Image: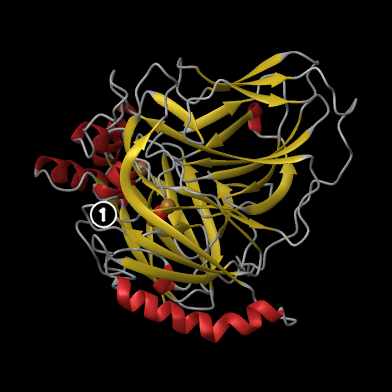
């Protein structure tokens, strides 16, 4: 329900009275309740160093990113969200397995929060890990203007490190006046790789350097809050170890070809041993886009070493309480993504398909997507449908409590980070090859033409969004609803 401020205060008083005893007494088994307040509003923020001006943004609590919400696993969060914008909003707790009514999807799980109104979200932090929050109403503009923040759930026994650091990375399209260019929802961005910008910030600043000490071990929580930009971070002389993806522990491993890949909305937890020489500097470089290197930041070593070599503390995180899918007994579903500007490869495939009378949603979807583009409607399609407007019959119904495999094909010429709400899923194979690090994710980056199988136990009932997290793709059709019932 949408709450006015008055009913909210009354409601909060009631909830506080009901819950204050267990929280305060700390009875065994009682979950402490942690209260937070977010206010979305326009403001100004310094993204660029002086003499550049400040940037007009929309943000939570007047900062970019919004405040870090940090709780312990098992605690209950109670977060009031006040809408100080001129348009409706909601907040989605990306990656957190909340009850459906707390998932923050306008018209699907709640009415949008009108300007001036407040909504109270309440859910338990069942999983430890690195999560984030952002609006789900016109997110291509609301997130793009700065509305997002980190949500960290600490393990009961945190990983032993010298320092924990969160980097929320964003990508902005700024003009010479330091203002965000006013071109959200542009058709070219929708048809191509989304609204990729020209300026990358870490925690709301264009960074220069990050001070480190030789011998130090850091847990670095990376969150990609960009609308569309994909990062492939090269830590040059350093060899980070990936310990969690999308908040969920994985077998600790070095990333393939040394690059830490983060599609929009994805999180990677790294353990970084700072092994460089005292007084040296080492760049962190984004190498995702061919021929386009972007120096993000420099690790700057001070002259006081902390220790000589890396510590030999364990790297394994405790598992979260996720139900393991039974792949052999799972119900299989196929999902095909089509649309967008066609790459040469896709055109050739379509030609081949037509000539050989080849089977498949790929060709049909391709045909339909061309028709869609000609009629100026959707641009991207999930199983042949470009979703428009608010909701939407479910594209799939998953029987509750059972294991399911989604065999997904990206039949487009573009990469897509595909996100499912309300669940984490095992990524079990890519192009038919089994994965090797026990990846549990909520957002999986699919390369052009790639097939990916994901598996999950459908244990969280409700209607859940399933969409590309390149927000311009989502808004132009690349979304659907998966029902768990
Ligand atoms: Cu992070 Cu449906 O979103
Ligand atoms: Cu996409």
Can residue 239 be seen at all in this image of the molecule?
Answer: yes
Tell me what residue is drawn at x 44 percent, y 42 percent. 63
Considering only vertical position in the picture, is 265 above or below 70?
A: above
Confirm or reject: label 1 Cβ below 8 Å from ligand 2.
Answer: no
Which residue is located at x 41 percent, y 31 percent?
Answer: 171
- Single out the residue that lies furthest toward the left: 375
Image height of 111 relative to 43, above or below: below
Q: Residues within 10 Å of mark 1 (few under 14, many from 20)?
A: many
Q: Is residue 154 left or right of residue 384?
A: right
Q: Quadrant of the N terminus?
A: bottom left
Would you name the residue on which mark 1 appears? 384
**Residue 358 shows in this picture:** no
Q: Position of residue 17 (x, y in %)?
A: 52, 84
Residue drawn at x 39%, y 62% as measured from the top left: 81
> Is 120 located above or below residue 70 in the figure?
below
Q: Is residue 351 left or right of residue 103?
A: left
Residue 427: percent from the left, percent from the top?
Answer: 57, 53
Of the four image quadrants, the one with ligand 1 is: bottom left
From the top left corner, tell me how far across and down residue 405 is, in percent. Answer: 51, 63
Q: Is residue 18 above or below residue 220?
A: below
Q: Nearer the viewer, residue 133 or 421?
A: 133
What is the quadrant of residue 38 in the picture? bottom left
Instruction: Please identify the quarter of the rendering in which residue 154 is found.
Output: bottom right
User: The C terminus is located in which quarter?
Assistant: bottom left
Who is closer to the viewer here, 154 or 295?
A: 154
> Horizontal and vertical percent for residue 442?
51, 55
């Amino acid at each position: 329900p949408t709450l006015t401020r008055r009913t909210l205060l009354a409601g909060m008083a009631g909830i506080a009275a009901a819950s204050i005893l267990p929280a305060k007494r700390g009875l065994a088994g009682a979950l402490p309740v942690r209260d937070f307040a977010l206010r979305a509003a326009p403001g100004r923020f310094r993204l660029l160093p002086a003499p550049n001006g400040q940037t007009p943004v929309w943000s939570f609590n007047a900062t970019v990113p919004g405040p870090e919400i940090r709780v312990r696993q098992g605690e209950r969060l109670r977060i009031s969200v006040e809408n100080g914008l001129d348009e409706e909003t909601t907040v989605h707790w990306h990656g957190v397995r909340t009850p459906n009514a707390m998932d923050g999807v306008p018209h699907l799980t709640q009415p949008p929060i009108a300007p001036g109104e407040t909504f109270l979200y309440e859910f338990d932090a069942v999983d430890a890990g690195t999560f984030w929050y952002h609006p789900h109403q016109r997110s291509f503009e609301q997130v793009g203007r700065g509305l997002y923040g980190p949500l960290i759930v600490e393990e009961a026994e945190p990983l032993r490190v010298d320092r924990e650091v969160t980097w929320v990375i964003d990508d902005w399209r700024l003009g010479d006046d330091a203002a965000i260019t006013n071109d959200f929802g542009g058709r070219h961005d929708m048809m191509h790789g989304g609204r990729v910008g020209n300026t990358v910030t870490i925690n709301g600043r264009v960074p220069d350097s990050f001070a480190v000490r030789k011998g130090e071990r850091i847990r670095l929580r990376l969150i990609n809050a960009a609308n569309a930009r994909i990062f492939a971070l090269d830590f040059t002389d350093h060899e980070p170890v990936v310990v969690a993806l999308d908040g969920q522990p994985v077998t600790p491993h070095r990333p393939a070809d040394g690059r830490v890949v983060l599609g929009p909305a994805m999180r990677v937890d790294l353990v970084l041993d700072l092994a460089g020489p005292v007084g040296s500097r080492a760049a962190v470089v984004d190498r995702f886009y061919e021929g386009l290197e972007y120096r993000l930041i420099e690790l700057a070593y001070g002259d006081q070493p902390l220790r000589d070599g890396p510590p030999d503390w364990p790297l394994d995180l405790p598992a979260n309480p996720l139900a393991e899918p039974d792949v052999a007994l799972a119900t299989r579903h196929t999902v095909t993504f089509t649309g967008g500007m066609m790459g040469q490869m896709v055109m050739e495939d379509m030609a081949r398909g037509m000539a050989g009378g080849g089977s498949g949603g790929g060709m049909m979807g391709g045909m339909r997507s061309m028709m869609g583009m000609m009629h100026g409607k959707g641009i991207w399609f999930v199983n042949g449908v470009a979703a428009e407007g608010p909701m939407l019959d479910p594209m799939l119904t998953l029987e509750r409590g059972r294991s399911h495999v989604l065999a997904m094909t990206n039949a487009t010429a573009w990469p897509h980070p595909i996100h499912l709400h309300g669940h984490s899923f095992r990524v079990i194979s890519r192009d038919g090859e089994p994965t090797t690090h026990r990846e549990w994710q909520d957002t999986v980056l699919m390369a052009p033409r790639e097939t990916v199988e994901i598996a999950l136990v459908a244990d969280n009932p409700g209607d859940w969004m399933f969409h590309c997290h390149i927000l311009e793709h989502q808004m132009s059709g690349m979304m659907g609803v998966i029902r768990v019932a």
